[in-house]
Amino acid sequence: MIGGVLPPGFKEVLALVEERAGLAAPSCLAAALEGIQRAMARANQDDVDVYLREVSFDNALLDDLLTELTIGETYFFRTHEHFDHLRRVVLPELRERQGPEHLMRTWSAACSSGEEPYSIAALLMAEGWEDHMTVRATDVSRTALQRAQQARYTDWSLRGPSADRMRPHLKQEGRFYWLSQDVKRHVQLGYLNLALETWPSAESGLWQLDVIFCRNVLIYFNRATIEGVARRLHASLDDGGYLFTGPSDPPLGDYAPFEPVLTEWGVLYRKPLASSNAGHFVPLQPLAPLRADSTPFTTGTPGAASSGRPVSGSFPSAAPGTSATPGVRPSPPGTLTTGAEGATAGVSPPWASGTGSYGGAPASGLGPAGGGAPSPVGTLSGGAPAAGAPAARTGDASTSGTRTRFTLSVEALEAVRVALARGDWREAARRAGAQSADPEGALAAVRALANLDPRAALFACEEASVRHPLVAGLRYLEALLLLGQARLSDAERAARQALYLEPGLAVGHLLMGHVLRRQDQTAAAARAYREAEGLCRKLSPEALVPLAEGERAGALANVARAEWRRLERTEG
């Protein structure tokens, strides 16, 4: 149902648009009303009931109305991160897997006035695909398609930070720019209403595609239409094909079996490869673990633990009950514990130091907050379960303020220690449960593993993030562990990914503030602290803050407030 208060007849116009094009009710009804009135004026109609009858049977009128109710905001190489990822990652992977003679098949699914598909074509030409490429471009607005066919632009289409990449293909005449035929001939324009069940099809060319750009259009659709479009986008892709959506578009994982790929700038989707080709795909890799001197770490070979000496290329082995990292308190024999009781280098958040100030928190070896320490999170302890038995879990390790407890057998715990002693981080992660298909279990296991070796925990966390790319808690924990290694730029990247996935994660904003302050980005750090305070103030003062090591909302809000006020005084 279309809600809100509209003059008689206008509500029915929006209902028709929702039925025919799948558009959801607009959030701003006043703007929608103005848009309908502008479309009516162009149709020389001032009676909304007559206009409703006419637009029901006249596709041109409906297209004109859709143009008013959607934002045709576009320019060349808009969201340049997408095009950079296409150039640096997607195209090389497709060339390696498909071979140099492969015909690159791409689609701009909501092309508007053409800047997006022409940008794709120009990029493919620059990367050597000119003789092996097709670019399909469709839109629901025939008016927009006419502008795309004309391919005449102004400076407004060149306002983006990467738009200069298009200038070699444009010829200026007065205040207009005309697109060269070399680019234009590669793009096939056509009408398509994404909300209709008329695609994919081999006849339309929307079939077995390598790359689809469907950006900033799903935000207009209602849930049922999003589900149908997502399912058809998935069916349109070839195995191993990629889908780019807009940063404001809804996530599609619940609607179609895409494989989400998390990057530094956000999420894109991939259609899984068939098993016969799966070996050719190189998955998104975690950051390579580093030694303290910033040299790469190479895992040791099995069986090296018997020598009692560190394996070549590994960290010094840690004896049971000890830590290889200075300043890290060892766990009691038979247990792996996380939380304030088992704070370790890089895994305890800065606000757990009890100093009341980020400025006084050391980079590693953070101790528990003053007073009663909260109960452990993610305990691994020797107990009754048999070796290899699934861990027992309670609570939600990713978003709630509740506790999660893991219990492993003594045999499994010893296997973790043996794997760490020989430098086999992957085996240690597997034995601890960090490779679990359950993201909550993986998160709790990584937190627990950090008490024996934070660097091994970082390795496990990054591998778990590849398996669970949309779990904000894993990215947040990765940022904490990276901060413990003083890898500030990597910590900032991981924290931003966590906040992209879960913008309301208060501890993520707190951590971002700390990382930015360490990088002397004072103004940005203050903004992060203010955001953290605002999120904490929305909770009850005694409420547990998700992922905050048992901290209460009121206390964290006060910490965040003290930090941004201190930074503002410093700036002043």
Image (cartoon, rainbow, N blue to C red):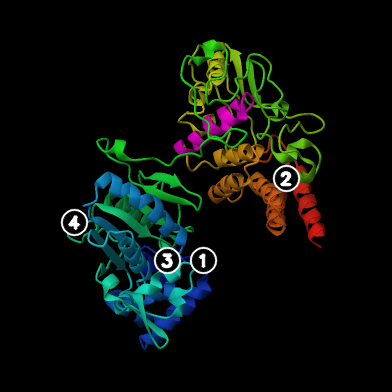
Disc 3 is placed on an element classified as loop
Can I make out residue 385 in this image? no
The span from disc 1 to disc 4 (Cα, nearest Å) is 37 Å
Q: Which mark is residue 540?
A: 2
The span from disc 2 to disc 4 (Cα, nearest Å) is 56 Å
Viewed as shown, does residue 431 lie left or right of 538? Answer: left
- Where is residue 281 shown, x and y percent of the image? 33, 40
Which residue carries the number 1 mark? 27
The quarter of the picture where the C terminus appears is bottom right
- Where is residue 347 shown, x and y percent of the image? 65, 34
Which is closer to the viewer, label 1 or label 4? Answer: 4
Disc 1 is placed on an element classified as loop
The kind of residue tagged 3 is: Phe
- Where is residue 408 shown, x and y percent of the image? 55, 17
Was residue 293 drawn as part of the magenta stretch in this picture? no
Which residue carries the number 4 mark? 202
321 is higher (above) or lower (below) than 170? above
Give the mark nearest the N terminus, 1 or 4.
1
The kind of residue tagged 4 is: Ala
Give the mark nearest the N terminus, 3 or 4.
3
The kind of residue tagged 2 is: Ser
Using the image as rendered, state which of residue 108 and residue 198 is in the foreground.
Answer: 108
The kind of residue tagged 1 is: Ser
Was residue 452 drawn as part of the magenta stretch in this picture? yes
Which residue carries the number 3 mark? 77
Q: Which residues are magenta?
A: 442-467
